[in-house]
Image (tube, rainbow, N blue to C red):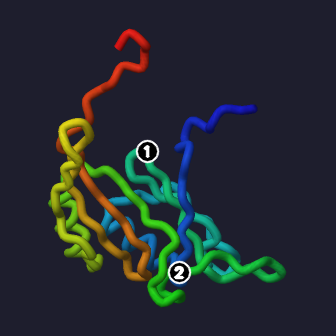
């Protein structure tokens, strides 16, 4: 078995949009993603793209099926706003990130707030946003990490 490629995270997600070109522009402007690859078909439609945020990677493609292929995924916009996933990313400053997202037109579903899970766990400050087609995104920064617990039997 070959190891995970050096330029790929062990887990990445694919999102489908009715207008992937507009989605890519929005994800760059509002959330700070950087496009590392964009594959267009002969008609100019986006077949595949890879957007990075630090070491995170998300793939964006259109919902339109290619001739002779099964339908691709769906945009939440076409499903009455229903989502089967939300994405969570750590940022340097959730409040500043939220302000950027709001200015670029993101719908802020949950305003920045601090969640403290107690001294034996962690504390994050974060918010939830929706992109123009309804995909849900959580962004947070860590305030306090959980105490490290030794994995050895000696403690």
Establish if 127 lies above or below 108.
above
Judging by the rendered image, the residue that carries numbered circle 2 is 75
The front one of 122 and 142 is: 122
Q: Is residue 128 left or right of residue 103?
A: right
Residue shown at the point (18%, 38%) measured from the top left = 119
Check the image and report above or below for 97 versus 10: below
**Residue 118 position within the rendered picture, expressed as x and y whole percent measured from the top left:** 20, 44
User: Front-most of 139 and 82?
Assistant: 82
Q: Is 36 rendered above or below residue 152?
A: below
Viewer-proximal residue, 98 or 24?
Answer: 98
Closer to the eye: label 2 or 1: 2
Callout 2–callout 1 Cβ contact below 8 Å: no
**In this figure, what is the number of numbered marks?**
2
Find residue 69 and report its horizontal and vertical position in percent.
80, 77
Quadrant in the picture for the C terminus: top left
Q: Earlier in the sequence, mark 2 or mark 1?
A: 1
User: Residue at (20%, 54%) from the top-left corner?
Assistant: 115
Callout 1 environment at 10 Å: few (<14), some (14 to 19), or many (20+)?
few
The disc placed on residue 139 is none
Q: Which residue is mark 1?
A: 55
> How packed is label 2: few (under 14 Cα within 10 Å), some, or many (20 or more)?
many
Q: Rounded to the nearest whole Å, what is the CA distance between mark 2 and mark 1? A: 25 Å
Helix, strand or loop for disc 2: loop
Q: Left or right: where does residue 103 sit relative to residue 54?
A: left
Task: Compare residues 75 and 18 and report the one nearer the observer.
Answer: 75
Q: Residue furthest right?
A: 68
Residue 75, x across and y down, in percent: 53, 80
Tell me what residue is drawn at x 16 percent, y 56 percent.
Answer: 114
What is the quadrant of the N terminus in the image? top right
Q: Secondary structure at mark 1?
A: loop
- The residue at 57%/35% (across/down) is 6
């Amino acid at each position: 078995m070959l190891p995970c490629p050096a330029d790929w995270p062990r887990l990445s997600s694919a999102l489908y949009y009715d207008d992937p070109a507009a989605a890519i522009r929005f994800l760059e402007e509002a959330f700070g993603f950087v496009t590392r690859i964009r594959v267009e078909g002969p008609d100019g439609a986006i077949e595949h793209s890879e957007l990075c945020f630090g070491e995170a990677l998300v793939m964006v493609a259109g919902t339109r099926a290619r001739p002779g292929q099964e339908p691709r995924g769906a945009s939440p916009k076409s499903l009455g706003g229903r989502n089967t996933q939300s994405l969570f990313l750590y940022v340097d400053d959730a409040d500043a990130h939220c302000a950027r997202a709001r200015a670029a037109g993101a719908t802020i579903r949950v305003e920045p707030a601090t969640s403290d899970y107690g001294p034996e766990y962690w504390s994050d400050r974060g918010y939830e946003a929706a992109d123009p087609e309804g995909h849900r995104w959580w962004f947070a920064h860590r305030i306090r990490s959980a105490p490290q617990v030794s994995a050895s039997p000696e403690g």
